[in-house]
Image (tube, helix red, strand yellow):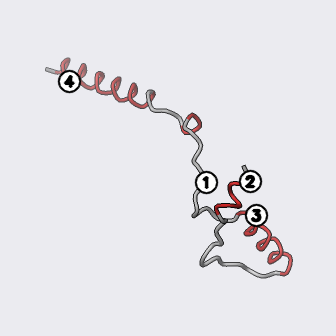
Amino acid sequence: MNASLRVLALSLTVVGLAACAGMPEKSTQAERAPSIMDADEAYVAYVERVARRRGIEVVWVNVPRAKAAEQDSDD
């Protein structure tokens, strides 16, 4: 009985490790296409940089979004 529990535990461990090893890494997945909901990172960085120089804290309630035409031209 004790030996069968050991074999069962060892088998489940091996199967679990094999399942984790078989998962694809994030770097191998295809890149995500730009979305209409992507933030305009350049504008956000500019505003935060200017605000930091002036000693102002910026809290984004609605982050500005890049237009789809601007995203297409960046690629």
Mark 2 residue element? helix
Residue under label 1:
34
Mark 3 residue element? helix
* Separation of marks 3 and 1 at Cα, in angstroms: 15 Å
Residue under label 2:
74
* Separation of marks 2 and 1 at Cα, in angstroms: 10 Å
Q: Where does the image place residue 61, in percent across and percent down from the top left?
A: 60, 78
* Circle 2 or circle 4, nearest the eye: 2
Residue under label 3:
42
Q: Are marks 2 and 3 in contact (CB under 8 Å)?
A: no
**Few, some or many C-alpha atoms within 10 Å of disc 4 (few <14, some 14-19, many ≥20)?**
few
Residue under label 4:
5
Q: Is residue 73 left or right of residue 11?
A: right
Which is nearer the N-term, disc 2 or disc 1?
1
Identify which amino acid the numbered label 1 is placed on: Pro
**Few, some or many C-alpha atoms within 10 Å of disc 3 (few <14, some 14-19, many ≥20)?**
few
* Separation of marks 4 and 3 at Cα, in angstroms: 58 Å
Q: Are marks 2 and 1 in contact (CB under 8 Å)?
A: yes
Residue at the (24%, 21%) spot, across then down: 6
* Separation of marks 2 and 3 at Cα, in angstroms: 12 Å
Q: Is residue 73 left or right of residue 39?
A: right
Which is nearer the N-term, disc 2 or disc 3?
3
* Separation of marks 4 and 1 at Cα, in angstroms: 51 Å
Mark identifier at residue 16: none
Identify which amino acid the numbered label 3 is placed on: Ala
Q: Where does the image place residue 74, in percent across and percent down from the top left?
A: 74, 53
